[in-house]
């Protein structure tokens, strides 16, 4: 479970279906952000830098954990401009099978406020696994954000590095039940447009859901949640069998 999402702003052999990607692709969102900031205009865009650090009881990406359980440190950095362009990065420790490493994600996009309230956004990101570069992939997204929730639709032409075109839609929401705690919820749906067998990717559909409470302490937030993912039997390479329902917790600090 990831508490701080990017600004509105994851058992057959895979040898035959994986392909390494150029490492320079990880820099694409940051290079795009630099070109946006240096584009001709009245003046250099004003920047607003925010971020967070967190520790999670485990890291599940779109309902699944590709490795062992364990405390997971994470960090997020966001850079917003007064022109609507934004970018940033996310880092998390992650175990793929029994190999420890990190998941690194860079993203950049454009957001605009709506007259009726809220905002819309478009962006792209690159996901890099330090211990499994063959699973690196790119995706683009579109989303809407409101006062108490957000929704996004992602498209990846080579999800997890495989020849699989994948859509992922999600809805995130919270409701302030009391000044001392909020109800939080998440619903996601992954759809394989290509069909066929790929480790960790369903033949057609897979859903994941989470409901819990968030307790703020100034800039810090403690979250306890119950998670559920559809168990379709499809595992990542070396993916251990985890229960489809599980309690999780996380502690984050925003700055």
Image: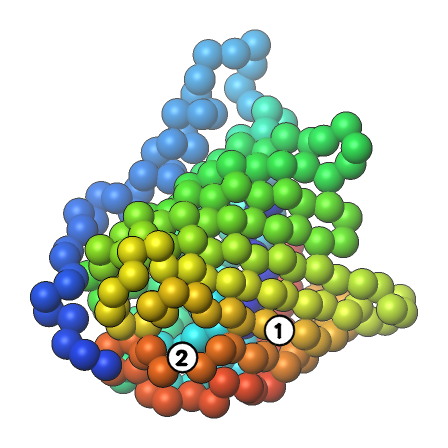
Residue at 40% in and 79% down: 232
Q: In the image, residue 229 lies at what x, y percent?
A: 51, 77
What colour-coding does the image apply? rainbow
Residue at 56% in and 14% down: 43
Q: Is residue 52 visible?
A: no
- Closer to the camera in the image, 107 or 255: 107
Q: In the image, residue 143 lies at what x, y percent?
A: 58, 43
Indicate left or right for 131 with 46 as reference. left
Residue at 15% in and 63% down: 17
- Hey, which quadrant is residue 19 in on the image? bottom left
The image's mark for residue 210 is 1
Specify which label sits upstream in the sequence, 1 or 2.
1
Give the structural element (helix, strand or loop) at label 2.
Answer: loop
Marks 1 and 2: which is nearer the front? Answer: 2
Tell me the quadrant of the picture where the N terminus can be found: bottom right
Q: Is residue 4 above or below residue 156?
A: below
- Closer to the camera in the image, 217 or 161: 161
Label 2 belongs to which residue? 232
Q: Is residue 64 above or below residue 141?
A: below
Give the structural element (helix, strand or loop) at label 1.
Answer: strand
Tell me the quadrant of the picture where the C terminus can be found: bottom right
Q: Is residue 145 visible?
A: yes
Pointer 1 local density, CA inside 10 Å: few below 14, some 14–19, many at least 20: many
Disc tally is 2
Residue at 43% in and 21% down: 38
Q: CA distance from mark 1 to mark 2?
A: 18 Å
Give the residue furthest to the right: 178
Pointer 2 local density, CA inside 10 Å: few below 14, some 14–19, many at least 20: some
- Closer to the camera in the image, 13 or 34: 13
- Closer to the camera in the image, 33 or 178: 178
Give the residue furthest to the left: 16
């Amino acid at each position: 479970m990831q508490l701080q999402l990017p600004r509105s702003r994851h058992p057959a052999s895979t040898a035959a279906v994986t392909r390494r990607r150029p490492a320079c692709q990880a820099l694409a969102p940051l290079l795009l952000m630099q070109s946006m900031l240096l584009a001709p205009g009245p003046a250099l865009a004003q920047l607003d830098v925010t971020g967070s650090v967190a520790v999670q009881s485990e890291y599940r990406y779109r309902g699944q954990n590709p490795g062992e359980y364990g405390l997971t440190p994470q960090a997020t950095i966001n850079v917003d401009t007064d022109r609507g362009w934004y970018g940033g990065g996310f880092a998390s420790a992650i175990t793929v099978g029994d190999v420890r490493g990190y998941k690194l994600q860079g993203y950049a996009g454009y957001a605009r406020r709506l007259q009726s309230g809220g905002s819309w956004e478009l962006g792209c990101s690159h996901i890099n696994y330090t211990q499994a570069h063959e699973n690196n992939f790119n995706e683009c997204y579109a989303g809407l954000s409101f006062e108490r929730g957000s929704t996004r639709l992602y498209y990846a032409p080579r999800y997890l590095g495989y020849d699989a075109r994948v859509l992922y839609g999600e809805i995130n929401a919270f409701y302030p039940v009391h000044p001392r705690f909020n109800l939080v919820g998440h619903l996601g749906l992954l759809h394989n447009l290509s069909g066929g067998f790929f480790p960790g990717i369903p033949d057609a559909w897979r859903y994941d859901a989470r409901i819990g409470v968030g307790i703020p302490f100034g800039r810090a937030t403690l979250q306890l949640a119950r998670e559920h993912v559809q168990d379709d039997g499809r595992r990542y390479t070396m993916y251990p069998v985890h229960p489809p329902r599980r309690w999780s917790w996380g502690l984050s600090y925003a700055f």
